[in-house]
Image: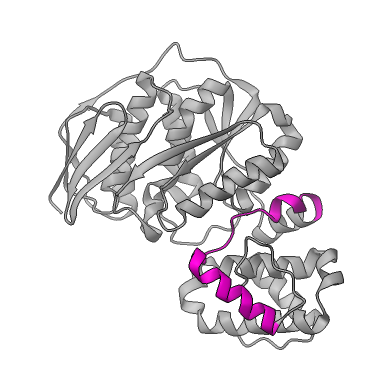
Amino acid sequence: MRRLIVSYQYPYSLSMEGPKGTERLAIRANYPETPLSKMLFQNLGLMHMVAPYLPERIVTDFPVEMHFVELIRRMYAWEKRPMPRFSSVVHRKFSSLPKTSDKKVIIDYSGGKDSIWNAWWCENDYGRANVSLAHIAQLNKLSASEEKKAVIRQKGELGFPNVEIVDLKNSSRNRGYSIMRSRNMFIIGLTIPFALERGASRIIIEGFAECASGESFTGTEANIRGFNRLINLLGIPVQVAWRDRKEMDILKDLILKYPEGLGLANSCFSAKYFKGNTRRSWEKHAPTFPLFDTQCGSCFKCRVTNIARIRYDRKLLLTASPKDIRTYIALTDKWLKDNRESFDDMLTESFIATFKRVARQYGVALTS
């Protein structure tokens, strides 16, 4: 694509004429209104909107900060595309920003198992009063509604005191796997103003312990470290931080130390209207196997969680019969064999090792 024109409307709205019509990205309400938050929204929102198309020329009716020009160009280079040209570039550095404290953190929070694990260890390390959560709603359209409901439920049932929910109006075509070209940095950018309001010096994100090869631009540790350097160059007293822990070790921690959190995790791929039928099929095939009420039992995320539960959850072993556990393992093996191409890049080493272990333990011969 040769050119895309992106326009800004006060206070937080971007629009663009894409190849299939007008695309918009806006914050609905209740967002800090400062020169810094405006700049972050404009620049990282721009990056998010052009990411699906990677046009040769980017035209805006607002200035693009020089450091973000370089960031967007690095995204292009990651995708092996020629460097884009910009219509308007400025150089700014923000001073007199609020001071932040190493004793306070804010978590970019999706409501899934990884963000619940982050909330668990942060509360242990920093104390609940010093931990805030920020949830960016409506970015991943397919799961947005369920994610937001899960965050609200977790806030109530787990007692999180400091939760910020940013509601987006989002008709961007940036979706599916390619959303990771820009997604993580856009979310971090929208969280920075809340971090400054709360006095938090760190924004906590998911780690990179088992990143697959071929990750998109914002899904890699090296590029997030580069983003930290950009934040520092802008004079923002906040950094992005994470703890690396393997997927099945995260689940082990939650099962053994924070089971009430895991039971509320939004870790299910199935659409709401499919979930009832899928759960009923498990009531037929493995009636004693206890699914969480958040689970369909059959999607990839549910199977990963439930294989970990078979390995580590003693309460499950008191409820589920050995026959039904073998049935769950065997049907998961068949499902993985039938769907390997779709989920091969999501199979972590820790999951594969744990799956093989529980299969040996229950005498199930694997074919996947």
Residue 71 part of the magenta-drawn span: no
- Whether residue 196 is visible here, answered yes or no, is yes
Give, as a single range, the part of the protein colored magenta.
Answer: 256-285
Residue furthest to the left: 2
Query: Residue 361 location, x and y as percent?
Result: 81, 79
Q: How is the image coloured?
A: one colour
* Tag count: 0
Describe residue 232's horizontal placement relative to residue 127 as left or right. left
Would you say the magenta stretch is mainly helix, strand or loop? helix
Query: Residue 245 location, x and y as percent?
Result: 67, 52
**Residue at 23% from the left image edge and 32% from the top image edge:** 8
Query: Residue 16 location, x and y as percent?
Result: 20, 43
Residue 266 part of the magenta-drawn span: yes
Describe residue 115's horizontal placement relative to residue 127 as left or right. left
The quadrant of the rendering that contains the N terminus is bottom left
The quadrant of the rendering that contains the C terminus is bottom right
- Is residue 242 placed above or below 250 in the rendered structure? above
Describe residue 90's horizontal placement relative to residue 134 as left or right. left
> As rendered, which of 90 and 340 lies closer to the eye?
340
Describe residue 304's horizontal placement relative to residue 68 as left or right. right
> As rendered, which of 148 and 57 lies closer to the eye?
148
**Residue at 75% from the left image edge and 58% from the top image edge:** 252
**Residue at 30% from the left image edge and 26% from the top image edge:** 11
Quarter holding residue 89: top left
